[in-house]
């Protein structure tokens, strides 16, 4: 049958957080990439899928377990593996031609052969005529074409694509995706396997032979879904639609709590990640959900279309709504709760009241901040206290973003105020005076 | 490809000399001859005590300008090499970074002129019987005025290479050598160039001071603009000073047109922001060179040479090879290293205490600190005054886009012009009107460095978003409120950037500005600058060292407690 090219055997990776304790990113990941297949990795940001890709690329070393390429351990970037980057990672001072030649030059190929092969790759990806252009003269889609040509010119056995289309607009991304699939199907490239990391469900279903869904904190493969449809696939076909539905279901499976507790169920913890969602986006989604044609229950892919949000944006909104008790998730559908319906109808003051109440009940961090402020005689506390607390469980970037979300939500729910310049959190002014009276 | 073309006679006609080539040939030949001549003069035999011929006749000035320029370029080349080596070491090795960075921070705050008196003896001993020793000392002084901030910017550039580009370089298996030329150096180039220009201005300032060296009670005057001025000051020759100013003006213009403009225009391709952005620099010389096939061939040959070196220094194994296996790192070497560093620091501390105790005495140290406070007060007051004058001017210029571009070119030029050329005029006036040198010498400190404030304020004001401008107009902001709520916060970050440069330059300039001579007249203001200058004139090494050390402490403290905090504040809060 199919021969494995890359094997990951119970691979684990952790990073040191600020206080020196190890935070696990990947745990016990087993994975095999076989000849002749395209595999897509789906998961929320921070679920470790990019880390896994980088372990295979030889950019990061695994802490435990083994990463093998054709049976050999991967210590660094291997010859048969090429990569396409999310932000293209072109060298802005090199022309298209020189960018494509980069890997060949590093390898020490003779100039003539280098030029010839680069020209062939540029031609193949549809960029002929642009050899002399600098990347800054090109549009996003064309830049990514250069990125792909640069990877393909190495004639890689494995092509790794790290969210390669997410920096492009939808149409450009689709065109590029189709072009790659065409190359793959036609056999014009020697590539034997492609691994795609994505957070776009449709993209994954359209491209892959297998879709792997990642769970986060720590990252691991939670579900695997084979896609047994022949290419080219039709987005509107019922098979594809039902597969997309199914993946939505998988991704929202379990108690759809935000952050780490995804499949542990139960209450959220103090130091858990909060979905980074703007309040106006939450409210807008609620209103659309309450309105025609959904009337309280919507298929997630349809809702994504209606709200014009991308998959991962909508998933974040959905997890925030479930967290606050405004909605429930069921098999890839989102259902408005009575409270959510009330909220959608309510005017501004009532909304703020409900929002604040739900925060205190469901978001331990906000409740903790509020509790601390109420207890403190001066009624104000410095944000550093809470940052320090969060650093125990989160890395620096997450720490900052979680507190920012908590502060934004808490401010909206009239639970506390915050001064950006001093970093001080305090009780709302009117409540303070009324308490004194 | 299309090989038959080679037999087509027109090919020969076309690939021959184009019209640019004809003009370029004599120019290149002339430059080569001049360089050879200047270089030959630098290594001629010389015995200590011999006086070098020096004339105040204006017709010698071009030659002196050549010699000075040669020194500047050699120093610049050394600075570039130093910066690259520094940046590579500091970014690649954690242990090196731990020492190199603080060292650079200290070196940066050491007054440049201090180096000269200490190093010249060593350099003369290095090249006995040749002028090269003295030349080297002068070049070294210029080098110290340029290298530190360039090294710092190169380090910053190397460190801030975006993660994805680094990953791309790894995935495509670039070796360290290839990575340096293809990724790190190009990325650091714009910053490095900008700092090079800044350094150059500093260099002109100090070239004047570094060519006339006094060592073991002998004054050596190397042929050059600086010595010419020194001689003119000794002989109280105002005409000669005027000629020198003219020569310097021409020199700065030539530098700008023949060197920096083309370089900036060329380096435009290294800008990282991939979308348009500010208007590109333009240079007639670069256009010319680009249109000239001969120079293009030279450039291509250089490129090929680089590529050949890539072939030599490449990775010939991949990530599955046993050679790529990471070495198990242990903490012991790092600890040993830390211990060694600590031991050296303690030893240095002990030497220092011993030195103060035996050589200069504690009371002298206290006195020098008091002098340092005088100079610090001057720097603060001057920066404040400069801000008062130049912020309104800068805002006005910056808000007029038509004026801004032209003004910036002029100011860049003014900043490059060595202000110490005008010092004799100041002495003349001070003596004439018998003014108090403690007050009236001070403005000289900021004469050359104030332009950085103006320059940056203009840059800041011209980047204020137009919409903000309209909003301010729409809400009828006027008078004080307009300044407090709108204009001042908008330009504050750029003001801080400018003021940091200006204040650093002023500390340095205090050595020249607090102690000014004109023939036999010497004017002196109380301050640490004049202390160092005086001790240098007297050749009192322990006290020179003390003065330099204390000034260094002041500058570092100032940077650390004032500027860095302000800078961080602006970074967090005041940007668009």
Image (cartoon, grey):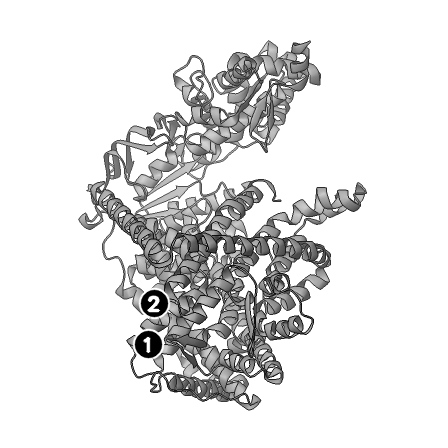
Residue in the picture at 31% in, 64% down: B310
Residue B150 position in % (x across, y down): 45, 61
As displayed, is residue A378 above or below residue A206?
above
- Quadrant hosting residue B520: bottom right
Q: Do discs 2 and 1 share a chain?
A: yes
Q: Quadrant of the C terminus of chain A?
A: top right
As displayed, is residue A391 above or below residue B369?
above
Q: Nearer the viewer, residue A304 or B67?
A: B67
**Residue at which label 1 appears:** B124
Q: Give the class, few, some or many, for how many residues have Cα within 10 Å of label 1's Cα (few <14, many ≥20).
A: many
Residue A81 position in % (x across, y down): 31, 47
Q: Horizontal placement of B20 versus B429: left or right?
A: left
Q: Is residue B194 visible?
A: no
Residue A75 position in % (x across, y down): 24, 44
**Residue at which label 2 appears:** B307
As displayed, is residue A178 above or below residue A425?
below
Q: Quadrant of the N terminus of chain A?
A: top left
Query: Distance between the Cα atoms at labels 2 and 1?
Result: 40 Å
Secondary structure at badge 2 equals helix
Q: Nearer the viewer, residue B109 or B539?
A: B539
Residue in the picture at 60% in, 69% down: B413
Q: Is residue A392 visible?
A: yes
Q: Which label's residue is closer to the chain start, 2 or 1?
A: 1
- Residue A141 is tagged as none
Residue at mark 2: chain: B
Residue in the picture at 38% in, 87% down: B50
Residue B460 position in % (x across, y down): 64, 53
Secondary structure at badge 1 equals helix
């Amino acid at each position: 049958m199919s021969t494995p090219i890359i094997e990951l055997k119970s691979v684990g990776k952790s990073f040191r957080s600020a206080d020196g304790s190890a935070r696990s990113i990947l745990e016990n990941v087993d994975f095999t990439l076989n000849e002749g297949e395209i595999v897509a990795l789906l998961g929320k940001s921070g679920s470790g899928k990019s880390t896994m890709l980088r372990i295979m690329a030889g950019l990061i070393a695994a802490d435990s377990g083994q990463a093998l390429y054709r049976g050999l351990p991967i210590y660094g970037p291997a010859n048969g593996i090429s990569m396409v980057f999310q932000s293209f990672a072109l060298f802005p001072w090199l022309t298209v031609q020189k960018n494509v030649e980069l890997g060949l030059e590093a390898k020490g190929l003779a100039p003539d052969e280098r030029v010839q092969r680069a020209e062939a790759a540029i031609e193949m990806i549809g960029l002929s005529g642009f050899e002399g252009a600098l990347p800054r003269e090109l549009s996003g889609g064309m830049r990514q074409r250069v990125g792909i040509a640069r990877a393909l010119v190495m004639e890689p056995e494995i092509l790794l694509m790290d969210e390669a289309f997410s920096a492009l607009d939808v149409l450009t991304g689709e065109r590029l995706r189709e072009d790659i699939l065409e190359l793959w199907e036609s056999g014009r490239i020697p590539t034997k396997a492609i691994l795609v990391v994505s957070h776009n469900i449709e993209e994954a279903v359209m491209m892959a032979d297998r879709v792997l869904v990642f769970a986060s904190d720590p990252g691991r493969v939670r579900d695997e879904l084979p896609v047994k449809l022949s290419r080219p696939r039709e987005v509107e076909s019922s098979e594809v639609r039902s597969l997309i539905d199914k993946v939505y279901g998988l991704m929202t499976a379990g108690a759809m709590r935000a952050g780490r507790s995804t499949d542990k169920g139960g209450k959220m913890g103090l130091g858990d990640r909060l979905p980074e969602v703007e309040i106006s986006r939450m409210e807008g989604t609620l209103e659309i959900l309450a309105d025609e044609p959904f009337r309280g229950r919507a298929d997630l892919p349809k809702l994504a279309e209606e709200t014009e949000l991308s998959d991962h944006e909508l998933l974040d909104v959905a997890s925030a709504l479930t967290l606050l008790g405004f909605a429930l998730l069921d098999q890839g559908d989102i259902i408005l709760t009575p409270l959510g319906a009330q909220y959608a109808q309510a005017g501004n003051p009532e909304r703020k009241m409900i929002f604040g109440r739900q925060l205190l009940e469901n978001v331990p961090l906000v409740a903790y901040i509020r509790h601390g402020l109420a207890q403190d005689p001066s009624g104000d506390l410095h944000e550093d206290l809470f940052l320090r607390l969060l650093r125990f469980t989160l890395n620096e970037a997450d720490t900052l973003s979680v507190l920012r979300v908590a502060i934004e939500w808490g401010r909206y729910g009239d639970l506390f105020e915050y001064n950006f310049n001093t970093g001080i959190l305090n009780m709302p002014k009117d409540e303070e005076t009324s308490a004194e009276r | 490809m299309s090989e038959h073309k080679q037999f087509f006679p027109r090919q020969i006609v076309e690939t021959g000399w184009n019209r640019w080539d004809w003009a370029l040939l004599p120019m290149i030949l002339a430059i080569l001859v001049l360089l050879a001549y200047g270089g030959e003069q630098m290594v001629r035999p010389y015995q200590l005590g011999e006086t070098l011929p020096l004339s105040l006749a204006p017709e010698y000035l071009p030659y002196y300008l050549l010699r000075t320029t040669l020194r500047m370029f050699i120093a610049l080349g050394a600075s570039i090499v130093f910066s690259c080596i520094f940046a590579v070491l500091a970014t690649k090795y954690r242990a090196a970074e731990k020492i190199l960075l603080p060292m650079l921070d200290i070196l940066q705050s050491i007054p440049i002129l201090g180096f000269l008196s200490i190093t010249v003896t060593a350099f003369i001993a290095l090249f006995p019987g040749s002028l090269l020793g003295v030349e080297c000392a002068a070049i070294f002084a210029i080098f110290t005025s340029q290298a530190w901030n360039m090294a710092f910017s190169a380090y910053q550039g190397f460190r801030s290479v975006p993660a994805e580009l680094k990953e791309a370089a790894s995935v495509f298996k670039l070796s360290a050598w290839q990575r340096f030329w293809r990724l790190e150096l190009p990325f650091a180039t714009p910053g490095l160039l900008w700092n090079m220009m800044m350094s150059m201005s500093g260099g002109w300032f100090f070239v004047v001071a570094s060519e006339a060296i006094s060592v073991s009670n002998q004054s050596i005057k190397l042929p050059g603009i600086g010595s010419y001025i020194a001689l003119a000051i000794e002989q109280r020759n105002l005409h000669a000073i005027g000629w020198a100013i003219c020569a310097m003006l021409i020199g700065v213009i030539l530098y700008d047109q023949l060197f920096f403009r083309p370089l900036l225009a060329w380096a435009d391709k290294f800008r990282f922001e991939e979308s348009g952005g500010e208007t590109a620099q333009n240079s007639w010389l670069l256009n010319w060179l680009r249109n000239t096939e001969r120079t293009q061939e030279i450039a291509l040959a250089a490129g090929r040479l680089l590529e050949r070196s890539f072939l030599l220094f490449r990775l010939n194994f991949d990530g599955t090879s046993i050679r790529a296996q990471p070495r198990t790192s242990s903490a012991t070497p790092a600890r040993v290293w830390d211990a060694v560093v600590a031991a050296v620091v303690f030893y240095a501390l002990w030497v220092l205490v011993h030195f103060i105790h035996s050589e200069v005495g504690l009371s002298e140290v206290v006195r020098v600190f008091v002098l340092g406070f005088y100079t610090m007060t001057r720097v603060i007051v001057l920066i404040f005054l400069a801000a008062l004058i130049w912020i309104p001017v800068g805002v006005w210029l910056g808000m007029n886009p038509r004026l801004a571009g032209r003004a910036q070119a002029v100011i860049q030029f003014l900043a490059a012009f060595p202000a110490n050329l005008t010092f004799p005029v100041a002495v003349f006036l001070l003596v004439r009107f018998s003014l108090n040198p403690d007050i009236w010498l001070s403005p000289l400190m900021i004469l050359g460095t104030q332009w950085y404030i103006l320059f940056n304020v203009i840059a800041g004001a011209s980047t204020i978003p137009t919409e903000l401008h309209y909003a301010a107009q729409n809400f009828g902001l006027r008078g004080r409120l307009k300044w407090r709520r709108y204009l001042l916060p908008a330009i504050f970050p750029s003001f801080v950037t400018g003021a940091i440069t200006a204040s650093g330059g002023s500390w340095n300039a205090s050595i020249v500005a607090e102690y000014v001579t004109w023939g036999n007249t010497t004017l002196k203001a109380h301050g640490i600058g004049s202390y160092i200058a005086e001790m240098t004139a007297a050749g009192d090494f322990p006290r020179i060292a003390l003065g330099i050390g204390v000034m260094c402490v002041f500058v570092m403290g100032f940077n650390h407690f004032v500027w860095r905090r302000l800078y961080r504040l602006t970074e967090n809060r005041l940007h668009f």
